[in-house]
Image (cartoon, grey):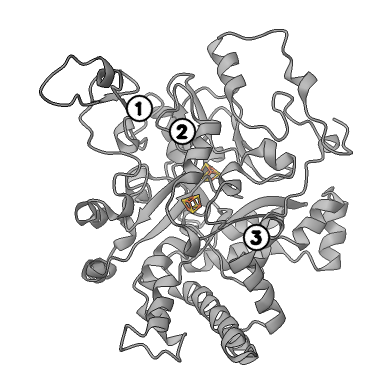
């Protein structure tokens, strides 16, 4: 089986300020249309919290992703074809609009047309679907910045077991963090396997997962099959839609809209090479704690000449292989192991990874506010983290705290290393080596994690349309699904306008 190239993203949670710019810019480009009012391809959740849709991580309830059968073989948690056929008119695992939220706007007209009265007029909320007045009970950011968390955070599925008491006790110290989310563009996508129509597919050339709007029959099994709840049903067109990883921009060598507009500059995009032969084995390891290691083991070292030779023989363009050598995703996730996948236990082999947040512990250390923490012992402080390591592990390493500890120790060592350079005038190489990183690599890590500029964070090779058909309906570098709306809804279509005539010619590439 051939080597494949996969586009991936790493988000550095230490830098997210929860501004939602990524969500808003994504929405303006992709889901600012009738039928998708409630849809956020990119959303940002406050943790602890319930997320969007509500409690999406509770797979006992939603049954998304994969599990192993008694013989140790992968099977969809929601069941196979027979179960789907029996439930085709009633899918019990499907979230309702109330689990997402009923989208609303406000009766602004009333503000200017209300008759004169003793009190100021009020713009009341009304449903964007029915137009009826709405009694707001839930929204996509209902528990934003811990709003109402005394009530809602108790339902966070990551607070299971022993953590429940500990997190409640630490609530007084107001720990919180942000979790920006998009589709994971999984290597083993359960949405694709769940689709009875064959409309969901994973692109061979870059691994981006898309929905063919013409083939989709609106059965919505992709919605229930995705454990991250990152496919959505457009109630107006009757088709599924999902995050496209802004593929027309990616094809032109540009970052996704969410990454380009991220205020914290915390998103990194790059290519990794993997052996497609190893996918099933990596997703099927019996112990959930081994899933991270199994996924890491799939990625091939682009510095290995034999890997490069094989990749080229398997048809991966030379410039893609060179991009893989400079990939920030490979560096952060594989080389330095400071980025971790979201819920690897879903067995979809997700490809949006996260650098866990360190800031609260470093402020304890640096400000000396916790008498139990020795300011000289940056590593000892990891377990004093106000965000318990176990909570992060529940999200990022199937509950195994060791990969999270390693990432945090390396990030803490990087700060301490640079601090010695600034304060003492000489970087302490022993601090880098204590976490298994050579000083030269520590400098590279600092550049990527702390001060990386545009070209460091985004290493995106352009598409090679000559290698295969590219959807002629999309403009390279442009985004949006308006053309789908026009075609599917049979709305006004300007026949004189043929997008094929307007496709931007990418430098030096014939299309
Ligand atoms: S995260 Fe994306 S690729 Fe993975 S299963 Fe869900 S929709 Fe599919
Ligand atoms: S734009 Fe960046 S910093 Fe702002 S919420 Fe999104 S991911 Fe976080």
Q: Quadrant of the C terminus?
A: top right
Asked if 53 appears above or below 429 in the picture, the reply is: above
Circle 1 residues within 10 Å: few <14, some 14–19, many ≥20: few
* 267 or 1, nearer to the observer: 267
Q: Is residue 453 left or right of residue 123?
A: right
SS class, disc 3: helix
Q: Residue 329, labelled with which disc? A: 3
Q: Position of residue 251 (x, y in %)?
A: 73, 40
Q: Which residue is mark 2?
A: 232
Q: Which residue is mark 1?
A: 90
Which label's residue is closer to the chain start, 1 or 2? 1
Circle 2 residues within 10 Å: few <14, some 14–19, many ≥20: many
* 106 or 183, nearer to the observer: 106
Q: Position of residue 217 (x, y in %)?
A: 52, 22
- The residue shown at (49%, 35%) is 27
Report if residue 188 is visible in the image.
no
Asked if 241 appears above or below 413 in the picture, the reply is: above
Determine whether label 3 and label 1 are within 8 Å by CB. Answer: no
Which label's residue is closer to the chain start, 2 or 3? 2
Q: Residue 288, labelled with which disc? A: none
């Amino acid at each position: 089986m051939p080597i494949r190239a996969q586009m991936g993203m790493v988000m550095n949670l230490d830098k997210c300020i929860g501004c939602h710019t990524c969500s808003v810019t994504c929405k303006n480009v992709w889901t600012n249309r009738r039928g998708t009012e409630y849809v956020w391809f990119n959303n940002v959740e406050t943790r602890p919290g319930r997320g969007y849709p509500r409690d999406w991580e509770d797979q006992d309830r939603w049954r998304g992703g994969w599990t192993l059968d008694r013989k140790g073989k992968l099977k969809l948690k929601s069941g196979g074809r027979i179960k789907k056929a029996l439930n085709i008119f009633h899918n019990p695992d499907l979230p309702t609009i109330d689990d997402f939220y009923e989208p609303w706007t406000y009766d602004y007209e009333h503000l200017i047309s209300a008759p004169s009265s003793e009190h100021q007029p009020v713009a009341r909320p009304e449903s964007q679907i029915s137009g009826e007045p709405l009694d707001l009970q839930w929204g996509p950011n209902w528990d934003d910045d811990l709003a109402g968390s005394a009530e809602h955070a108790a339902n966070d599925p990551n607070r299971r077991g022993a953590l429940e008491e500990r997190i409640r006790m630490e609530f007084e110290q107001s720990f919180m963090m942000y979790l920006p989310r998009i589709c994971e563009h999984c290597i083993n996508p359960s949405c694709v396997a769940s689709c009875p129509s064959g409309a969901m597919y994973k692109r061979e050339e870059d691994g981006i997962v898309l929905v063919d709007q013409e083939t989709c029959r609106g059965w919505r099994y992709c919605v229930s099959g995705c454990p991250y709840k990152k496919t959505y049903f457009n109630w107006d067109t009757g088709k599924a839609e999902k995050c496209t990883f802004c593929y027309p921009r990616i094809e032109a060598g540009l970052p996704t809209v969410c990454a380009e507009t991220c205020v914290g500059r915390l998103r990194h995009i790059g290519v990794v090479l993997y052996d497609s032969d190893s996918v099933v084995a990596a997703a099927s390891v019996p112990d959930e704690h081994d899933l991270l290691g199994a996924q890491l083991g799939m990625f091939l070292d682009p510095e290995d000449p034999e890997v490069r030779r094989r990749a080229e023989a398997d048809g991966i363009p030379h410039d893609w292989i060179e991009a893989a050598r400079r990939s920030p995703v490979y560096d952060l996730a594989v080389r330095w192991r400071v980025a971790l996948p979201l819920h690897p236990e879903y067995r979809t082999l997700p490809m949006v990874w996260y650098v866990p947040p360190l800031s609260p512990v470093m402020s304890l250390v640096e400000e000396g506010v916790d008498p139990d923490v020795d300011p000289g012992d940056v590593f000892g402080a990891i377990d004093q983290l106000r965000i318990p390591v176990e909570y992060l592990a529940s999200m990022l390493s199937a509950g195994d705290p060791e990969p999270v500890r390693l990432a945090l120790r390396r990030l803490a060592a990087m700060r301490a290393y640079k601090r010695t350079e600034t304060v003492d005038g000489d970087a302490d190489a022993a601090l880098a080596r204590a976490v298994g990183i050579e000083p030269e690599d520590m400098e590279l890590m600092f550049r990527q994690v702390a001060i990386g500029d545009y070209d460091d964070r985004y290493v995106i090779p352009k598409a090679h349309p000559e290698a295969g058909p590219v959807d002629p309906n999309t403009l390279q570098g442009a985004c949006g699904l308006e053309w789908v709306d026009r075609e599917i809804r049979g709305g006004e279509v300007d026949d004189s306008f043929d997008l094929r005539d307007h496709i931007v010619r990418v430098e030096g590439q014939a299309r």
